[in-house]
Image: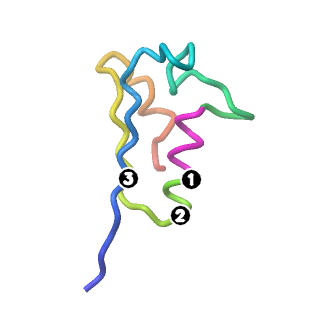
Amino acid sequence: MSESVVAVILAAGRGRRMGIGKHKLQIGAGTFLQRAVETCAGGGLAPVICVVSPGERERLAALFDGA
């Protein structure tokens, strides 16, 4: 039996502490949220679940299509 570890990334907040939301904060060529997803997936975590604001769901889905 194979076990998997799920990653849940909480990114639905207003970003008050960082000054901007994780889905908009640029780090290198991508965003903080993209980097977090890539790191989790690259580390073998599956599935990777992102909790985002309802208004951001469709826009962000395009970034992770096929990820």
Q: CB atoms at circles 3 and 1 under 8 Å apart?
A: no
Q: Position of residue 45 (x, y in %)?
A: 43, 62
Residue tagged by mark 1? 39
Res. 17 mark = none
Label 3 to label 2, Cα distance in Å? 10 Å
What kind of element bears circle 1?
A: helix
24, above or below 63, in the image? above
Tag 2 or tag 3, which sits nearer the N-term? 3
29, above or below 20, in the image? below
Query: Which amino acid is tagged 1?
Result: Thr
For label 3, the crowd category at 10 Å Cα-Cα, with few meaning under 14, some 14 to 19 and many 20 or more, is: some
As for residue 62 lying within the magenta part, the answer is: no
The residue that appears at 56% across and 21% down in the rendered structure is 24
What kind of element bears circle 2?
A: loop
Residue tagged by mark 3? 7
For label 2, the crowd category at 10 Å Cα-Cα, with few meaning under 14, some 14 to 19 and many 20 or more, is: few
As for residue 37 lying within the magenta part, the answer is: yes
Label 3 to label 1, Cα distance in Å? 10 Å
Q: Main secondary structure of the magenta part?
A: helix
Residue tagged by mark 2? 43
The stretch in magenta equals 32-39
Q: CB atoms at circles 2 and 1 under 8 Å apart?
A: yes
